[in-house]
Amino acid sequence: MSSFDEPTVDVVVVGAGHNSLITAAYLAKAGLEVAVLEAKDIIGGNTVTEELTLPGWQHDSCSSAHAVIQNNPVIRDDELGLIADYGLRYVYTDPAAVLPLDEGDAVVLHRSVERTADEIARFSAKDAQRFTTLVDEWDKELRYAHRRWNTGELTDAPGDLKYEELCRRSAYDVVHEEFEHPVTRRLFLWMGFANFQPPKRPGTGLLPISILKGRLDYGWATPVGGSGALPAALAKLLLDHGGQIFTNAGVSEILASHGRADGVRTHDGRIVRARKAVVSSAHVRTMAAMFEASACPPDLVKAAENWRPGIGLFAVHAALHKDITYRLGDGSEVYSTSGGLGGPEGTLRQVEGCHSGEPEFDDPWMLLVSSTVADPDRAATGATFKILTAAPAELAGGRSWEEFGPQYAQHLLTLAGRHVQGLDSNNIAAIRHETPTSLATRSPSNIGGSCHGGEFVTADGGVVPGLQQWASSLDGLFYTGSMAHPGGSVSGWPGRNAARAVLSAVGIDPVTVMS
């Protein structure tokens, strides 16, 4: 839309990423008048699908897997009717992932505890038994605590305390204490680094089992039509409930009067007033500059001071003539939507290199994504392929990503090509790389090339991935997006949590909407 049909609404939502749209959708479903303002000409934020290489090849620009959101009631219970009424569909793949090993073998993560345990037992019977025990502990206790953590509601129940104890440890320590074989450790640590938290950082101990369990349950949960199918379905729902979405409508100022947030001003000077709330997914540092100095809430000032970028990302998108395959130990080959490379020590060097400015060349952690294995219509005459890895925001030695990017992209393709079939020049029709620099340009929230919202330093010196609140100290202002708890990834939790906070604040019982 190019003009504001309703200059005053109940709620103004700043940004149209998937979390903002989830917030807006719940509020509109509750009967509130909602207007979403997006700076770009497309909605979705980092959850978008575009023709990045050649016409007809639909690539997920940033996010691709929607496994985490499957446990959110927005999908698990279809609270908004996105699946029943708005055509959102997912493919739950099997295998969930294939990790190539040396000498033509591979470890396969299936959507089956028993088959995966059998796979691990090829390397260690003890590790296979410990794997099944951990999965059982997750199913009986930890998954319920994890849901409570996602909504900021952990208690002192025994299961919650056990969950917190596991969280406090580092992913590296947990993996190396629980498992004995290098292949098992490789599998779990590769999974644990999937949201780009340093493996040796205290507080990451839960990640290996929680992420791996999500893949056991849902495989590489692939949205039919691309990652952008989620925001597209949310937009349809929002419009059906009287909401409005305005693109090319970047917000430059959050307006406040009489001690409450009551509207916004766009870059071109237009004003939209909010009777009840302003919900913002703008980056904390950007948002802090959206107020007159005297009006900026203290909690936002503090959050901006405590925020720092997360690990930067580097991606290679390729248009292929046909999908790649993975070689297995028995000499056969298998297609898989997801694959992974990189061992524990290489990952540790890579994390260190993100701070020192040196990309990892020998054994980098890499995610390999072949979306067309699950969703072939994304490329009617071929296949899509993506490599995602971690990389420093700034290179050492005066190098620039503009000059070095093509070389590093080709190096990653060469490394991956040693372990999979189909990355030779005869099968690659076109490639496009994204550096931390270009990712930061793509979205103002991707500071330092980090697409997961960055992180916050706590008072005790720890680090958390998301701001531990959804309501500001300024009345009427609420936070959503990847900077809000529980942080980045396509989880939808910041969006649903923000909606719950707004509904409670305006006197609507969230249970009447979220059921």
Image (cartoon, rainbow, N blue to C red):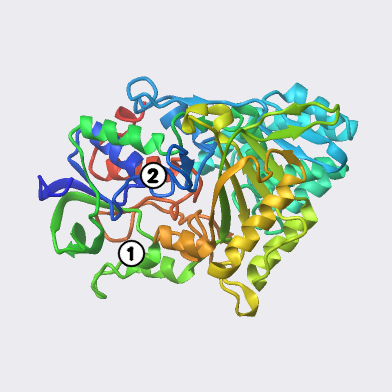
Residue at 54% across, 61% down: 435
- Callout 1, which amino acid? Met
Can the viewer see residue 455 in this picture?
A: no
* Towards the viewer: 249 or 306: 249
Q: Position of residue 428 (x, y in %)?
A: 61, 43
Q: Position of residue 17 (x, y in %)?
A: 37, 47
Residue at 27% across, 45% down: 505
Q: Give the distance between the C-alpha atoms of the residues marked 2 and 1, in whole angstroms.
A: 17 Å
What's the mark number on residue 287? 1
- The N terminus appears in which quarter of the rendering? top left
- Callout 2, which amino acid? Asn
Q: Does residue 454 lie above or below 396 as drawn? A: above
What's the mark number on residue 19? 2
Q: Does residue 434 lie above or below 90 as drawn? A: below
Q: Quadrant of residue 477?
A: bottom left
Look at the numbered disc 1 and give the secondary structure of its residue.
Answer: helix
Q: Is residue 88 left or right of residue 512?
A: right
Q: Position of residue 183 (x, y in %)?
A: 83, 41
